[in-house]
């Protein structure tokens, strides 16, 4: 989906604005690309309606057999260990993201059908469950079971829960879940109280702008413009496009625009 990150972030903002008493659970998967079941990948690839199933013979030829991995703690050839890679996708495979998504999607779809009160969004393994307080925890445990069926394990210490309301304290969250009091980061940008979002954006802009001021020191003007347009402007633009417009940040937005204009004028001489 084009603009998937922005769609997820703004969707979460809109949902929590409509249902301020709901809870969002942020679910993280441990070592996802190395542990997902290859049998699940084959099954889902064959089940896809359309031309994607024609990739099965190609994918099967790469993943049907176990592959050797050579591992060593030192540069000595005498201390090399041989490991057998029997699950997951291979590093460098251009299809690994799509293959992972197919098997992961199965777990999400089954869970969603069993828990219609909750909403789901996911990018790679960054999954969010949003719903009424009493529904999100059973939904999480159901998803955990379906993920296990395809070889995936939830990592509770990297999971988090947040709500605009004060209902989190009454929930029986799984052990290890983080409980940020007024904030949550979703695919980079913040979701939380207006004060937290304003502080986060202001700090991010100040850090990056301090680096942008160093660009005129580069000898190559083309490289300097490349860093400005392809790195800093893109990254900061993404942050601004995925954060709701806040009155507390109006002066910060103007300062950011003036700073970029000044840098461009400096580079132009």
Image: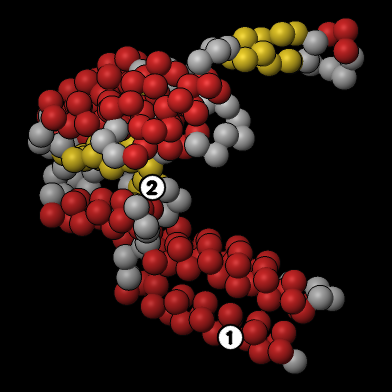
The image quadrant that residue 151 belongs to is top left
Q: Disc 1 designates what residue?
A: 261
Dividing the picture into quarters, in which one does residue 180 lie? top left
Q: Position of residue 51 (x, y in %)?
A: 34, 39
User: Along the polypeptide, which appears first: circle 2 or circle 1?
Assistant: 2
Q: Which one is in front, 173 or 122?
A: 122
Residue 185 appears at what percent x and percent y?
40, 47
Q: Is residue 240 left or right of residue 73?
A: left
Residue depicted at 74% across the width and 76% down the height:
222
Vertical comparison of 149 with 97: above or below: above
10 Å neighbourhood of mark 2: few (<14), some, or many (≥20)?
some
Local SS, label 1: helix
Give the spatial CA distance, label 2 vs label 1. 29 Å
Q: Which residue is mark 2?
A: 186
Q: Nearer the viewer, residue 5 or 23?
A: 5
Answer yes or no: do the residues labelled 2 and 1 have beta carbons within 8 Å?
Answer: no
Q: Quadrant of the C terminus?
A: bottom right
Q: Report whether residue 25 is seen.
A: no
Query: Dot 2: what SS?
Result: loop
Residue that appears at 20% across and 57% down = 14
Q: Does any portion of residue 55 appear in the rendered image?
A: yes
Residue at (50% x, 33% y) in the render: 96
Between 67 and 174, the one lying in front of the other is 67
1 shown above or below 42 = below
Q: How is the image coloured?
A: secondary structure
Marker count (numbered): 2
Residue 13 vertical position relative to residue 80 in the rendered view, above or below: below
Rendering coords of residue 91 (x, y %): 60, 30
Q: In screen coordinates, is 148 left or right of 163?
A: right
Q: Compared to 228, does 79 lie above or below?
A: above
Apparent side of residue 255 relative to residue 245 in the rendered image (left or right):
right
Percent of width and height locating residue 121: 28, 42
């Amino acid at each position: 989906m084009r603009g998937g990150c922005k769609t997820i972030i703004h969707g979460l903002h809109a949902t929590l604005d409509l249902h301020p008493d709901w809870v969002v659970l942020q679910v993280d998967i441990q070592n996802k690309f190395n542990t997902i079941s290859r049998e699940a990948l084959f099954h889902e690839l064959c089940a896809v309606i359309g031309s994607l199933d024609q990739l099965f013979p190609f994918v099967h030829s790469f993943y049907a057999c176990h592959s050797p991995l050579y591992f060593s703690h030192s540069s000595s050839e005498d201390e090399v260990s041989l490991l057998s890679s029997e699950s997951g996708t291979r590093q460098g495979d251009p299809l690994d993201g799509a293959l992972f998504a197919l098997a992961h999607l199965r777990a999400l779809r089954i869970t969603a059908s069993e828990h219609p009160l909750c909403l789901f969004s996911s990018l790679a393994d960054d999954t969010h469950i949003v719903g009424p307080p009493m529904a999100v925890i059973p939904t999480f445990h159901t998803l955990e079971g379906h993920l296990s069926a395809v070889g995936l394990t939830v990592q509770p210490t990297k999971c988090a829960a947040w709500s605009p309301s004060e209902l989190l304290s009454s929930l029986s969250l799984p052990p290890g879940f983080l409980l940020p009091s007024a904030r949550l980061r979703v695919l980079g940008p913040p979701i939380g109280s207006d004060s937290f979002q304003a502080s986060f954006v202001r700090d991010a802009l100040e850090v990056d702008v301090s680096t942008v001021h160093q660009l005129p020191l580069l000898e190559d003007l083309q490289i300097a413009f490349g860093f400005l347009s392809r790195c800093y402007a893109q990254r900061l633009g993404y942050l601004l496009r995925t954060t709701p417009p806040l009155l507390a940040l109006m002066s910060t937005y103007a300062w950011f625009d003036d700073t970029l204009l000044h840098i461009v004028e400096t580079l132009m001489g």
